[in-house]
Structures are given as structure tokens and as C-alpha cells.
Image (cartoon, rainbow, N blue to C red):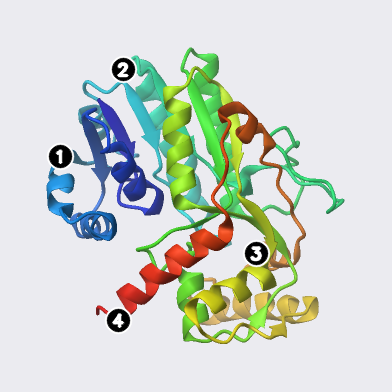
Amino acid sequence: MILVTGATGLVGSHLLFQLLKSDVPIRATYRRKETLQHVKHVFAYFSNHPNTLFNRIDWVEADINNIPQLQDAFKGVQWVYHCAALVSFDPHRYKLLRTVNIKGTANIVNLCLSHDVKKLCYVSSIAALGHYNRPEKHIHEQTEWNPEDDNTVYAITKYGAELEVWRGTQEGLDAVIVNPGIILGGGYWHGAGSGSLFKRLYEGQSFYTAGVTGYVGIWDVVKVMEMLMQSHIKNEGFILVSENLSFKTFFTKVAKALKVKPPYKEAKSWLLQLAWRLDWLKHAILRQPRILSKQAAKSAQSLTYYDNSKLKSALDFEFTPIDESIETVSTLFIKDRFST
């Protein structure tokens, strides 16, 4: 029996579709019934029988911080894919991020140990990796994390969650961690994921920033996860990045695929500095959620390049060209846009 947590999210839903290609029984967790529609929607992209596939899954309502619910979910489970997480860069949500990302992962690790789970795959992020002060140096899996850096609250809690997984390996749990870059996939056009970038660019976005980061297609992510779980590899982490691109290049590629005008104004450093301060002031006065934090503004300007050679060597894996992933996601976006 396979267990997938966070199954109604971007990674979880696509992972389920990938895993359903085999005959291994699958159990998946959800927190709210209305989110189950996201899974059916993703299945409908790639199958004429989404409900049939959906009904092959043993669905369990379970919050990763509700131990009795999780105990039920873990019955008979041998392999666990832990995809559940909270994505937010709002400093005012730090306590909630710690509760979901760190405490929730600790709960999953503890239950894996107590139920003699054979292997755990944890979905982390490139945000949880260390950084270099020299942009020409590519970040790899052993790049040292510096707690003194001005890290985002999301990065801090994903790194903390990784420590819980490594703690589990010291107690006898076999585990692998994947650190994807910005994941490109369809069906989730709102929130903090990459889908919102496609939506904003389609609706018209004038500004781009000078930063560079790593990108990867969703199908590469879930295929690698399955391959790692089926392999003899254990207690290792892997960067999942197809290509490193500047935000300007990425936005231009997406705009071209969507057949809209690309951003044409660079948001200079001074403008971003002003923007995050105004965002903080708006939160302080109107109590509105933060949109741009100081750390996020810094990341938008950061030149960060990632080395994917460890994964490519370990699995003899070739990533999908990012242009192909952009084209696929853009087609799905247009399909959704004009079907509603």
C-alpha cells in the first residue's frame, strides 16, 4: 500500500496519476472535500475516465497534525510520499508554517517509524538549500545552509522539515528527499504556485525582475519520485531542476506560448525595496495579507543557479526541456480559461 499526503495539490495530484499506472493499492489524504475536485480536474487532462481512476484511490480525510486521523491513514502502508505542505512567504504566517511544515513532517516521520514503513519520499524545495555569495557558483545538494542568512520563512520551515526526515533516517527509516525548482504544471492557477504566474502573464504583467532561478516540469518531478522510491537509493537528497533561467527569459517564453505581450519593464532594486515596505505598511494598517516580503524581494533579484548532475547521474535521467513544459502548461491554461 502506498500513502500520498497532500494528494490534492499540484505534486500530489500528478503523482497519483503517475502511480495509478501500476496496480499497487494507493491511499491518499485530503483535508477538505472541495479540494478533491482538483484531482479529478487534473485526471481529466490526461484520461477520458477520470472518475474511474479517482475511485481506485482509498481516500482518507486526515490533517498531518491530527494523529488519530493519521493513524488510520497509515494502516497497512509500506511506502509514503509526503507532499503535504504550506507554501507562503508571509512572515506573519511563520508559526503556521512551522506547524504544518515542520511539526507535520515530524508526525509523518514518527508514524513511518512506528508502522515499519519501507521508504519515505519527502517533497522539499530548492528554497531549503544553502546559497553562495558568488552567483557563478552552482548550488548543489551539499551546499551548506546558513541560518544567519536572511532566509524566507518558507525556506526556514522547509529546511526544518528536512531535518526531521534526516532525524528519521538516524532512527532507522529509509528516505529520499527531492528539492524541485519552480514546478510547472497545470490545474492550479491561483495561490503561490507557478500556475499563478501563467495567469498573471496572460492577464497582462508589465514588470520583470533581474533574478535567476531553476525550473522543472511536474511530470519530471513525479517520475523521479517514483524512480527513487523503486530504486535502492536511500538517505539522499536530489535537486530537481531542468534549466536555470532568468525571470525575464522565463516570462518571455510563457508570454510567447500564451500569445500575449511579455513584460517589458525591469523592476529595479530600489522599486522592489519600496514595494515590500509599502506592502508591510498596508499589512500594518489594513491587516491585509502580505504579498511581497523583504526576503522575497531579495530572491527576485538573486542570481541562483542549481546543479542537477547528481540526479542525472544517479538515475541516468534526462529532464524535459523547459520550453516543452511551458508549452504544455500554457495549452492547459488556455483550455481551462475558455472552458469556464
Residue 35: % across, % down: 25, 58
Q: Which residue is mark 2?
A: 115
Which amino acid, by three-letter code, is at mark 4? Phe
Residue 27: % across, % down: 23, 35
User: Which mark sits nearer the N-terminus, 2 or 4?
Assistant: 2
Label 3 – label 2 distance at C-alpha: 39 Å
The reply, left or right, for residue 284 in relation to residue 66 is right
Q: Are marks 2 and 4 in contact (CB under 8 Å)?
A: no
- Looking at the rendered structure, the secondary structure element under dot 2 is loop
Label 3 – label 1 distance at C-alpha: 40 Å
- Foreground disc of the pair 1, 2: 1
Label 3 – label 4 distance at C-alpha: 32 Å
The circle drawn on residue 296 is 3
Q: Are marks 3 and 2 in contact (CB under 8 Å)?
A: no
Residue drawn at 41 percent across, 21 percent down = 119
Q: Is residue 268 visible?
A: yes
Which amino acid, by three-letter code, is at mark 1? Arg
The foreground one among 78 and 87 is 78
- Looking at the rendered structure, the secondary structure element under dot 1 is loop
The circle drawn on residue 338 is 4
- Looking at the rendered structure, the secondary structure element under dot 3 is helix
Residue drawn at 27 percent across, 37 percent down = 21
Q: Which residue is mark 1?
A: 56
